[in-house]
Image (spheres, rainbow, N blue to C red):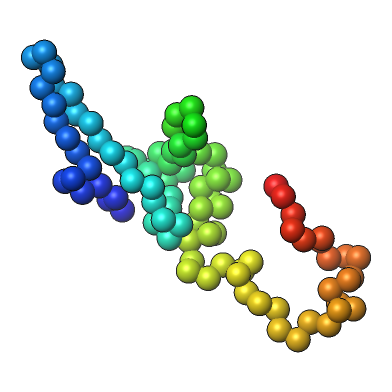
């Protein structure tokens, strides 16, 4: 998927040097993973405050899992009783990872 448009690319001439500036917009959840060279597991990168880094296979699989418009954690559990909710086998919520 190509996220870039013509407006995202600017070309500057600075002191007889050509500088190309590319603004890479953030992909929506449904558009991820975005990768280069037709290689999903080797060409997917993630951006943090320090720069871009290559994603692990697990991170790419998480992006694929989270693509659908409705993910499993968005579903409302109908007809659940208080007794069922306080089952010690169920994890506490919210969980922070």
Q: Quadrant of residue 57?
A: top right
Q: Tell me residue 20's x, y (percent).
A: 19, 29
In the displayed structure, would residue 88 be above or below residue 38? Answer: below
Please tell me which residue is depicted at 28% across the width and 39% down the height of the picture. Answer: 23
Is residue 54 among what the camera can see?
no
Q: Quadrant of residue 7?
A: top left
Is residue 76 among what the camera can see?
yes
Q: Tell me residue 21's x, y (percent).
A: 23, 31
Please tell me which residue is depicted at 50% across the width and 56% down the height of the picture. Answer: 64
Q: Tell me residue 28's x, y (percent).
A: 41, 56
Q: Is residue 18 left or right of residue 77?
A: left
- Extreme-left residue of the structure: 16
Please tell me which residue is depicted at 8% across the width and 14% down the height of the picture. Answer: 16
In the displayed structure, would residue 89 be above or below residue 53? Answer: below
Q: Tell me residue 6's x, y (percent).
A: 16, 46
For this rendering, which residue is in front, 3 or 33? Answer: 3
For this rendering, which residue is in front, 67 or 56? Answer: 67
In the displayed structure, would residue 65 be above or below residue 77? Answer: above
For this rendering, which residue is in front, 47 or 63? Answer: 47
In the displayed structure, would residue 75 be above or below residue 67? Answer: below
Please tell me which residue is depicted at 76% across the width and 86% down the height of the picture. Answer: 79
């Amino acid at each position: 998927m190509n996220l870039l448009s013509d407006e995202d690319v600017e070309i500057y001439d600075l002191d007889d040097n050509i500088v190309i500036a590319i603004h890479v917009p953030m992909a929506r959840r449904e558009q991820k993973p975005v990768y280069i060279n037709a290689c999903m597991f080797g060409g997917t990168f993630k951006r943090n405050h320090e720069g871009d880094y290559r994603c692990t296979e697990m991170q790419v699989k998480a992006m694929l899992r989270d693509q659908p418009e409705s993910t499993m954690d968005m579903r409302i559990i109908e007809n659940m009783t208080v007794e069922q909710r306080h089952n010690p086998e169920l994890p506490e919520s919210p969980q922070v990872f």
